């Protein structure tokens, strides 16, 4: 199936150019926006970078919801900084996507009318303060696992955006772990909240890496082009191996009765998420899909006067420049 897909995307371009392009990728060169690239490479990048950018922006919603209710001034300041960072990550990524010839407005509209996706995880609710710790620990933990290898991705602007983003993501993960640790070491009621957050967010976090390799449509071509550096299952396994000892340290139980260390493989064996739930969520049927898109649509509509004002100002400035010449 993968070979078939590679062939169908590749044949749209001149074979000689394609071979030279692949040789550059194989040699570890970075592809820059003005370089020749196969149409499939450009489209795949717009899809992945766009989806990633939307995830950063939509991902502000479940945490932003808790800024006014953070338990202390210190936690509030940390959460505020983190949520602002996510907006910055979205902007780096929209800029990287724009170098591929798509405007930020175009891809935003594709998010707003459901033509583009964002990460499945943000369609789950954050019900209490322990969830905010768990989001930093698990969701940012999964995001870093995916993003560290992407610093070496073949497209220059994406790779450079990822280097900046990863510096901040590690702070995000640490602050989440610190918040959940405080809960896990707190009163019995607080510990119960931490366990409940882990119970609800464990499988949605595993889903962040995408479907299992046998169902991943894009992995083979994306890996050949070094748009992705690892398969979905490879990264999911790394995440499980890193996170289980952290849960043990916290005295929390990962909600997977089949989880156990496999000496022979040197990895944990674990149960897959319910993939029917994953596909249902990315189709738009998760617990918060409707709310998330409604919030983004409202923000876009509310900001119309700002965009109109800026555009009018830019037009006026350009007209004055023409008149002066
Ligand atoms: N959610 O063939 P594959 C963050 C779709 S950053 C929704 O395996 P691919 C920071 C996929 O698009 C989180 N859809 O796809 C933060 C495709 O459908 P399509 C975002 C998903 O692209 C933390 C179909 O399934 N990170 O959270 C998901 O090769 C805290 C088939 O799948 C990135 O975007 C999913 N989880 O691999 C912010 C990283 N998984 O498009 C705030 C960059 C798959 O054909 C607070 N992206 N699909 O209609 C990637 O590495 C890849 O795109 C994957 C998916 C690994 C996500």
Image (cartoon, helix red, strand yellow):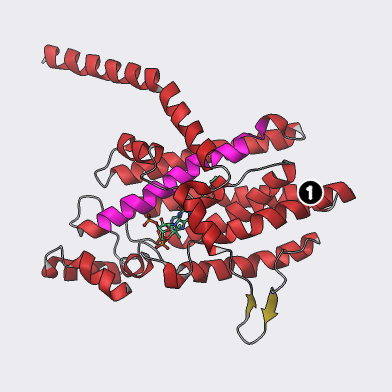
- 231 lies above or below 120: below
- Please report the bounds of the magenta region as a residue range: 41-67
Q: Of residues 43 and 217, which is closer to you in this image?
A: 217
Furthest-right residue in this view: 187
- Residue drawn at x 32%, y 70% is 224
- Residue drawn at x 84%, y 52% is 185
Q: Of residues 49 and 280, which is closer to you in this image?
A: 280
Q: Is residue 144 at all visible to an observer of this figure?
A: no
Ligand 1 visible in quadrant: bottom left
Q: Position of residue 30 (x, y in %)?
A: 30, 60
Q: Position of residue 13 (x, y in %)?
A: 14, 63
Mark 1 surroundings within 10 Å by alpha-carbon count, few (fewer than 14), some (14 through 19), many (20 or more): some
Q: Of residues 13 and 159, which is closer to you in this image?
A: 13
Q: Main secondary structure of the magenta part?
A: helix
Say what secondary structure mark 1 lies in: helix
Quadrant showing the N terminus: bottom left
- Residue drawn at x 28%, y 45% is 99
Q: Is residue 50 left or right of residue 148?
A: left
Q: Is residue 263 left or right of residue 224?
A: right
- Residue drawn at x 63%, y 55% is 138
Mark count: 1
Q: Is residue 311 left or right of residue 13?
A: right
Which residue is identified by label 1? 193
Q: Is residue 20 magenta?
A: no
Quadrant of the rendered image containing residue 145 = bottom right
Q: Is residue 318 at all visible to an observer of this figure?
A: yes
Q: Position of residue 16 (x, y in %)?
A: 12, 70
């Amino acid at each position: 199936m993968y070979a078939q897909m590679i062939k169908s995307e590749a044949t749209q371009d001149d074979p000689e150019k394609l071979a030279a392009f692949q040789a550059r990728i194989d040699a570890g060169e970075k592809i820059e926006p003005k370089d020749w690239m196969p149409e499939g490479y450009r489209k795949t990048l717009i899809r992945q970078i766009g989806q990633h950018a939307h995830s950063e922006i939509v991902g502000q919603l479940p945490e932003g919801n808790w800024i006014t209710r953070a338990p202390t001034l210190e936690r509030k300041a940390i959460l505020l900084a983190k949520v602002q960072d996510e907006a910055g990550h979205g902007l780096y990524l929209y800029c990287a996507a724009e170098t591929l010839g798509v405007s930020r407005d175009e891809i935003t509209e594709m998010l707003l009318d459901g033509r583009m996706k964002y990460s499945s995880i943000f369609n789950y609710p954050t019900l209490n303060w322990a969830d905010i710790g768990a989001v930093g620990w698990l969701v940012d933990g999964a995001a870093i696992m995916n993003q560290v290898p992407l610093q070496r991705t073949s497209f220059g602007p994406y790779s450079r955006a990822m280097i900046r983003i990863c510096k901040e993501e590690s702070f995000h993960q640490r602050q989440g772990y610190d918040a959940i640790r405080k809960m896990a070491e707190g009163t019995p009621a607080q510990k119960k909240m931490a366990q409940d957050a882990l119970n609800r967010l464990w499988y949605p976090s595993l889903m962040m890496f995408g479907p299992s390799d046998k169902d991943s449509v894009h992995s083979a071509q994306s890996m050949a082009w070094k748009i992705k550096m690892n398969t979905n299952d490879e990264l999911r396994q790394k995440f499980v191996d890193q996170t289980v000892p952290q849960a043990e340290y916290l005295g929390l139980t990962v909600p997977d009765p089949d989880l156990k260390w496999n000496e022979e493989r040197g990895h944990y064996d674990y149960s897959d998420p319910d993939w029917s739930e994953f596909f249902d969520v990315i189709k738009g049927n998760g617990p918060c899909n409707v709310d998330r898109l409604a919030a983004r649509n409202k923000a876009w509509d509310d900001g119309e006067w700002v965009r109109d004002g800026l555009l009018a100002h830019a037009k006026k400035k350009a007209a004055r420049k023409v008149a002066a010449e």
